[in-house]
Amino acid sequence: MDKITVSKIVCLLFAVEASIIPDNYNRERTALLEEETLKAVGGKQILNANETIANNILMKWKMKELNTSHDDPLHFNFSEHYFSYKKNIEKSKVYQIIRRMPKGAVLHVHSTLMLHADILIKLTYENHLHVCYENEGILLYFSESTPKLGCPSNWALVSDLRNSSGDPVAFDSQFKKYFTLYKGDEQEYDFVDITTTWKRFHTVGRAIGSLTAYRPVREKYCYEVLKQYYTDNIMYIEMRMGLYGLYELDGTRHAKEYLVELHKNVTNKFIKDHPDFIGVKLIITQSRSQNIDRARDTLNATRRLKAEMPDMIAGLDFVGQEETGKPLTYYLPIFSEAKDEINFYLHAGETAWLGTSADENLVDAILLGAKRIGHGYALTKHPSLMSAVIKKDIALEVNVISNVVLSLVHDVRNHPLASYLALGLPVVLSSDDPGAWSAKPVSHDFFVAYMGVASKHADLRLLKQLAINSITYSSLDNERKARLFSVFNRRWDNFVKDVISDVFLSESV
Ligand SMILES: *[C@@H]1O[C@H](CO)[C@@H](O)[C@H](O)[C@H]1NC(C)=O
Ligand SMILES: *[C@@H]1O[C@H](CO)[C@@H](O)[C@H](O)[C@H]1NC(C)=O
Ligand SMILES: *[C@@H]1O[C@H](CO)[C@@H](O)[C@H](O)[C@H]1NC(C)=O
Ligand SMILES: *[C@@H]1O[C@H](CO)[C@@H](O)[C@H](O)[C@H]1NC(C)=O
Ligand SMILES: *[C@@H]1O[C@H](CO)[C@@H](O)[C@H](O)[C@H]1NC(C)=O
Ligand SMILES: *[C@@H]1O[C@H](CO)[C@@H](O)[C@H](O)[C@H]1NC(C)=O
Ligand SMILES: [Zn+2]
């Protein structure tokens, strides 16, 4: 057959196929897809002329970067462990746009696990820091003489060890591994079970917690947190924080309330240096391993602190691995004692096990009137609870990278966030403990959610809506919320102009 005959046959085939598709089919198909787009988070955002240009630039890069992996699914980075592609993230143009994008607020982060190990290591240069090497990790303590705390090895001065090592750079790069689950290039990226991960996570948390319990270090740490988050384009933070007494070099301990006052002072200082930063509020936390009397102490302390410093206290939460900790029902008696005074922002459903107490914590979080739910990972499996979340407009604080690192999901395309976004649920993106795995404050989380979880079609409207949600669902009063919106809008317009003029896309990050 010659070429012309072949093409005639092909044309004929197409004609036949076209004729059996009903006229209205494509119209209905388009209408269904449009309905879904409109329903999804960001679907109702309308972009102005400049935003539309910026969006085209964003989408051009997104398609370019995603197409490479669609063509070769073996190299679809987001179906691998976060640690395996982490070091490549910053090369992405989409990431560079996201990093510069104003992201509003961060509403789910734990106060001591917010900073990268590279910054923590600098704090280990403070004088009088002793280290005790334990089975898995380290414990740190500042004092003029050898600490009296028990230690399975011997306490040693970090400055001595660093000096006697002969290679301070090598010493630091080993030492900082105690502050992060991310071990760099030599790490194997196997997924491990949830209990193993949480054990490693606690070891890291113990090292960082012991470094930041010393008052002078905590002050510096706190200021540095604000600086890093501000640089990541975050203008307001709600931090979850347990109450405990910081100590001084001579061993004196402050009352646990002092920690809140310190955060207030450091925040004020930061605002003085950066007037468009709105501030910090704290969600006081109680470990789920503690009994009800300890929880009542924490609740009462939260009430007192809220009465004294209403601008600093958002509410209360329970923390720790849900599957092994006490269920919310255990604490029911005390929730009712303060429900009119204290708002709850509850971790619930951070589990892959359906029908367990961790899974059913979702029921209690809803019934107890939680303003937001931390994770809510299990929610899609509960249609009635999902309806209740929509009806009561309870925001979901989603932390995709945390769910990967803490062994809930392997391939982020299967993360329930995809469904939450499609259903238009009130979602806020956050990063949980970015310091514990050396992530950027929240930009890595936005990037992975945007590229790995959201629809291929999801564009600037989604990103803008997520930023707006973080302000809308914050615990700020109306006046401060309005101020945050105006700072956000101004920064957003500048961001759009920057994307259009491409001022930073070629810049190294
Ligand atoms: C769009 O960008 C141009 C050039 O930067 C600027 O003059 C104009 O005000 C912008 N329009 C909007 C609606 O932001
Ligand atoms: C990416 O693939 C889609 C089709 O899957 C195509 O429409 C688009 O032009 C491609 N983009 C680039 C930059 O290659
Ligand atoms: C995925 O990883 C490869 C290297 O393994 C990198 O070249 C590429 O830019 C990454 N893609 C994305 C979207 O991060
Ligand atoms: C480091 O060790 C050397 C001897 O090995 C000593 O001379 C020096 O003073 C030490 N420096 C500090 C800062 O301890
Ligand atoms: C906070 O600042 C006030 C006023 O300067 C000061 O009296 C107080 O001691 C400070 N508290 C802490 C914990 O730093
Ligand atoms: C907590 O506050 C309640 C109500 O004010 C009070 O009855 C209770 O004794 C307090 N408990 C503790 C442990 O302080
Ligand atoms: Zn959390």
Image (cartoon, rainbow, N blue to C red):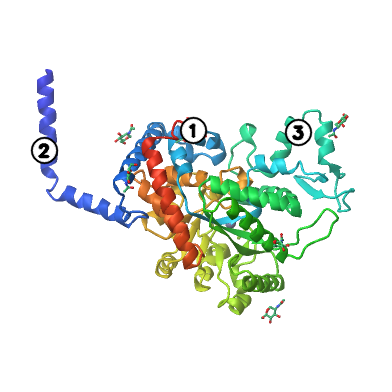
Which residue is nearer to you in this view: 372 or 330? Answer: 372
The residues bearing labels 3 and 1 have C-alpha atoms spaced at a distance of 28 Å
Q: Where is the N terminus found, in terms of image quarters? A: top left
Answer whether residue 68 is visible to the viewer in this image: yes
Which residue is nearer to you in this view: 456 or 95? Answer: 95
Q: Position of residue 106 (x, y in %)?
A: 52, 54
| Mark toward the start of the polypeptide (2 vs 1) | 2
Closer to viewer: mark 2 or mark 1: 1
Amino acid type shown at disc 1 = Lys
Element carrying mark 2: helix
Instruction: Decide: few, some or many residues near mark 2? Use Cα within 10 Å; few <14, some 14-19, many ≥20.
Output: few
Rendered view: 434 above or below 424? above
Residue drawn 61% across the image and 35% down it: 188
The residue beneath circle 1 is 91
Element carrying mark 3: helix
The residue beneath circle 2 is 16
Task: Name the side, left or right, on which 495 lies relative to 109.
Answer: left
